[in-house]
Image (cartoon, rainbow, N blue to C red):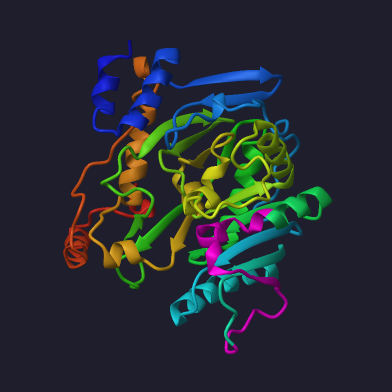
Amino acid sequence: MPDKQYLQTLTPLDARTRAVYASLLREHGGPGVRSDEAGCMLYDFVQQRQRSYLSQPRGCCEPPATGPEPAEGHCMAGKRLLVGVPSFGNDARTWSLLAVVLASLDHARRTGVDVEVGLDLTDPLPPSFQLPDGLRVTQWRHSASVKLALCGMYRRRFWAASAAGTHDYYMMIDNDVNASRENLEALCVQSRALSGTNLMPGLLRYETLTDEPGATRYLLDHMLRSPPHISYVLRHGGRDYVAAHNPMQGSFFLPAARMACVLRKSEARGGHGADWRDFHPNGSLEYYESLWLMPWFATVVPLEAELAQRHFVHHLTDKYTRRSEVTMATPAAFFRAASNFTRDRGKTGGSRPITLLGARRRRPQKKLEVERREREAGTPHNLWEVG
């Protein structure tokens, strides 16, 4: 039977999540690492109610990377990146957000990345919308009847591009997630570091309560009302990584070898999504954005502060901080908890899921009052404020 302290930790979780954790503990007494073949490391732990280690067919998509690491800032230099961006609606706010996202991708192009963008739209771009000069953008119009599957329309183009070998990297990103050149570089570097494993690097979406410089960031996918928040902290290649329990990030980033590999795995698995080009109008938004990868990959970010900051990406709407009562973990709280996690391994193997505590709901005005009071008191919230 699992240790009592596991059960105490798991008690507040929903039944499905608790059942998956319980099965892991029965089998291993905590997360495990397996090597199915020379150099292939498969990490077995729970993330978003799943265990990627158990999904068939098992195995790594590529051998571990060899040779010197790319020079600072040069991992994406000259690389061919295909980006899929869905955009719902025809209001001014939608187009303004899309313009910001495309401007960031254009900046990546102007700093050495060969970027190509495919837009999936429910409405035509307005005449006043200016696409960045020099950025390759192709548009596709879709009926609103596709519903949330609009977020999966990139699949057909990615399938064809993967078969033709026309790109080095693939990225899906929402039209309100502002991925920067620094984000792309970080994902590239960590994809290389995590090759030969079932781990993939991800992003941490954040929002702010104000547009003021240095405003506190709040981690969108770590709402305090939805425990747990940290699944596991692991060490690979001499570096610690934290696995957030909710890896939903409004995006994914895959090297070409992994894209081709996961297409083969998806077909071999059969069932829902076996033909990756198919779309399902009643599929969830989160499934199409990144969670479809979870049978084969667990999502992690580096624990080291300097590296972790490069994985933060702004959710441009800020709608959950500013227009709802939900409260979220700050980066400082999230990474402090993860750091403590690594020092508490012992009998538990560092495998207890961590739930961050705090008020689960506050009115937006109250959240802003609390933030300003705490900042005046010098309470660290953002990761760079933590010593």
Residue 317 versus residue 354 in the image, above or below: below
Lateral position of residue 222 relative to residue 70, left or right: left
Image coordinates for residue 250, horizontal then vertical, percent: 50, 55
For the point 40% across and 68% down, the residue is: 317
Q: Which residue occupies the extreme bottom position in the image?
A: 128
- Does the stretch in magenta take in 137? yes
Quarter-of-image position of residue 231 = top left
Residue 136 on image: x %, y %: 72, 72
Task: Reply above or below: 227 against 371.
Answer: above
Q: Quadrant of residue 374?
A: bottom left
The residue at 31%/52% (across/down) is: 330
Q: Is residue 220 within the magenta segment? A: no
Q: Residue at coordinates 70% horizontally, 71% vertically from top-left?
A: 138
**Residue interval drawn in magenta:** 127-155
Hey, which quadrant is residue 242 in on the image?
top left
**Which quarter of the figure is the N terminus placed in?**
top left
